[in-house]
Amino acid sequence: MLIGLQNLEKDFGETVVLKNITANVEPGDRIGIVGENGAGKTTLLRMLCGEYIPDNGELTIVRGVTLGYLEQSSKLDPTLDVYGEMRRAFQPVLDAMARMQVVEKQLTIRPGDETLLEEHARLSAVVDAADGYNMDPQIKKVLSGMAFGPETYEKKVAVLSGGEQTRLRLAKLLLQHPDVLILDEPTNHLDFATMEWLESFLNAYSGAVLVVSHDRYFLDAVCNRIWEVEDQGLTTYKGNFSAYLPQKEMAVTLQQKQHDADVARAAKLEDYIARNLVRASTTKMAQSRRKQLEKMEITEAPKSGVRELKFKFEFDIQPYNELVTIKNLCVKIGTRTLLEPFSMQVLRGERLVIAGPNGTGKSTLMQVLDGRRRPSGGMVRLGAGARASIFEQQQARRVGRVIDAIWDKYPQFSELEVRSHLARFNFRGEDVFKDCAALSGGELARLRFAEIMLERPNLLFLDEPTNHLDIYTRESLTQALMAYEGTLLLITHDRYLMNSLACPILYIEDGKATLYESYDKLMKRGEPAPAVPAEPKAAPKAGYGKEQRRRRAELRNRLKAVEDEIEAIGARIVELENEINSPEVLRDHVLLQEKCDELDDTRFHQTELFEEWEKLLEEQE
């Protein structure tokens, strides 16, 4: 045994978070900790690491066992570069090496000094224990595994993205080789390649691993035990997450059967007592039954379990079939080309996943597609009747209460209607009066989905929607998206969600967009493809004369003018849609009719411009 937990309890004021927690961590364990957001998983980890002191019970860590803890939001030194931050993991070794140099200089003067020789031996043991002389090869090996190439070594920590910082914090922890690795949601923001490397690393790790994760594929690939934190308690299951699910279902079924049997037996005893207590001939037998009933312990009924989100995305307006048209789209930031020109089309009712390594421009591309960012070249067109809703990867902090986030947009709703709607997203009771500024990432995500459901979009743009959701909410969202009949464009690293949607995947890497027809095809992208006969080279085009050059210049100028006008009209359409949905306009039927008429005219003009743009583009090509 490495760690022992016996009847642990942790309270915060009058709130009991965990109680009667009993479990062990054995050598070689790969333990996945699952539970709803707020169930107490992080609190449990912090007790194990000594950050929280249990209020009751006993926590035993075997002498000499070292722990390494990766928090969700641990900090790095923004003044250091990537390599310098990694060297900090060897700070005791670096200090020992520096002191050894001083001692060695002193030994040249006093070669037989026993005190100096003993100190040198002690310092040398510190360096050897950490394999300090191989410090640089160790650093480079781990950095390489975490997708930090030599060109990133001098990159400042302060300019790293959220995903890059997560990878660097994990890389730094792995250098310390603790006996027990304790990881709190390590897969957040990691791309496919890094997750696969992490899974392989943890499976080969010589110590034990405890990991809080909401990634089903990760839990299946790594874990051999599952700890479920639920209703202040902890239950242990053998096997990975897929093995845990039927065990959990069976345990709940058995508990329900035992509860029903106990209740039935108690009812029979009560009935016998009621019928026989007043009869002289049977009074003693009835009294005996009453003592049995008083001593009887009825098995507690299983809890209602996880409060799954029961929701679905629906829409009212059926849009044009060619809903998202992309032609020669190019995306740049400054002088850096994130995406070379590509063309494709997403039809009504289709789904498309956008995937790729971190930092390749997926979120930037999504902003171009949903209209929040102007393309560097080419065109994105949404078909007539498109009504879009957007979910951003990082939800902006809000002001006001949770209930006001819905009520302000839909003042015609009664308080009961607003609260009933929020309850579908697990905002119950006093939760609806929470200050939005105090909400967690998962709560902000659920609130945004509550808004999207009321917006009734026929086109969804979702950027990493599962990042802050617990494993059960992810399941509910997956089911809702699978049932959605509208059009979906989604950025995700969630392999379970990606596979469940069973749709094409646009993979962005090194500035190129490659379309894979399925998740399986994407996973096999590194395998050699069958040879394809080379197409005959096209004959060289004839040279242009003066008239042709003049016409091409006219086309370029007109194309630019049309693109600018389309962008302006698109912005005006968004403004009109927002105005039409505002409470002031909804209350004034005359103004509402004027706005609707203007919106129809603007969309008609937008269609005309798109037709002209296509003709100009064809002529230019």
Image (cartoon, rainbow, N blue to C red):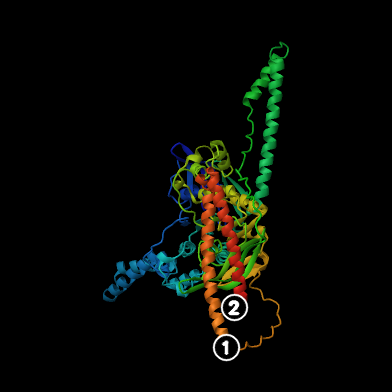
Q: Nearer the viewer, residue 512 or 87?
A: 512
Q: Is residue 469 visible?
A: no
Residue at position x 71%, y 15% from top?
276
Q: Nearer the viewer, residue 273 or 154?
A: 154
Residue type indicated by callout 2: Gln
For label 2, count other residues whose C-alpha is less than 10 Å away and answer few (under 14), some (14-19) or many (20+): some
Whole-percent x, y for residue 452 in the image: 57, 50
Q: Is residue 137 visible?
A: yes
- Give how far across and how far down residue 29 sits, in percent: 57, 56
Task: Find numbered disc 2 in the image and state the secondary structure of the residue it sits on.
Answer: helix
Quarter of the image where the C terminus is located: bottom right
Front-most of 125 and 588?
A: 588
On the rendered structure, is 195 left or right of 110? right
Question: Residue 620: which disc?
Answer: 2
Relative placement, left or right, of 7 versus 314 is left
Tell me residue 131's x, y (percent). 45, 69
Q: Which residue is mark 1?
A: 545
View extreme (top): residue: 280
Residue at horizontal 72 percent and vertical 16 percent from the top:
275
- Marks 2 and 1 sit apart, C-alpha to C-alpha, by 15 Å
> Element under label 1?
loop
